[in-house]
Amino acid sequence: MRNLVLIGMPGTGKSTIGGTLALRLRRPLVDTDRLLAKAAGKPLPAILAEEGLDAFLEREGGVGAHLRCERCVIATGGSMVLSEAAMENLRKDSLVIWLDTELGELERRIRRHADRGIAAAPGATVRQIEAQRRPYYEKYADLHVQGGGKIAEVAERILQTLRTQHPDYL
């Protein structure tokens, strides 16, 4: 399958950077947040508000656990790493890339898009969410890439790493 799977906190740019990578590598982009919203027939914030966190995480994990594609760039939702079944499926013959962005930058980005719907307990801070998820990002990542900066710069960092360390994924 030779997929590239992007994981990381909300606001790291997984979908945007994934789109750039997909274009540069001439591969399809699969955005699991879009798949989840389409399957539910409503946007992510509505799923969270109407069905609750546990149902959201179950739906998201199901998307990841059943996803099948070849030579795709897959942008996951930030909480996908909380589903072991999803991550085990996504890791099959794929390279998992953790986009890690500084906490202050994440807070600024998330504040700008406060309506995006983040799968977390009500009132949880970005710092608390990041602390909970960091061990999972560390566990599943094959590559750890700094996600701050311009989209093209981050995409180029990933491509350069692939060229030197994992050319079979190009």
Image: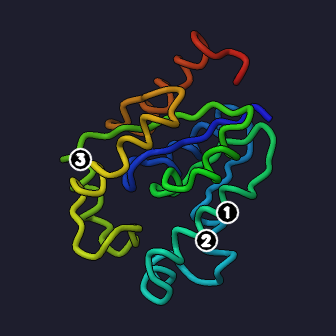
The residue sitting at 64% across, 36% down in the picture is 4
The residue sitting at 56% across, 52% down in the picture is 76
- Mark 2 vs mark 1, CA separation in Å: 6 Å
The residue sitting at 68% across, 53% down in the picture is 30
Q: Position of residue 94 (x, y in %)?
A: 69, 33
So how many labels did they put on this image? Answer: 3
Question: Between disc 3 and disc 1, whose residue precedes?
Answer: 1
**Residue linked to disc 3:** 105
The answer to which of 15 and 32 lies nearer the viewer is: 32
Q: For mark 3, give the secondary structure.
A: helix
The answer to which of 41 and 53 lies nearer the viewer is: 53
- Mark 3 vs mark 1, CA separation in Å: 28 Å
Marks 3 & 1, CB-CB < 8 Å contact: no
Q: Mark 3 or mark 1: which is in front? A: 1
Marks 2 & 1, CB-CB < 8 Å contact: yes
Q: Mark 2 or mark 3: which is in front? A: 2
Q: Position of residue 127 (x, y in %)?
A: 21, 53
* Amino acid under disc 1: Val
Quadrant including the C terminus: top right
Q: Quarter of the image holding residue 61?
A: bottom right
Q: What numbered label is drawn on residue 59?
A: 2
Q: Quarter of the image holding residue 121?
A: bottom left
Q: For mark 2, give the secondary structure.
A: helix
Q: Quarter of the image holding residue 118?
A: bottom left
Q: For mark 1, give the secondary structure.
A: helix
Is residue 13 left or right of 101 when viewed as pictured?
A: right
**Residue linked to disc 1:** 63
* Amino acid under disc 2: Arg
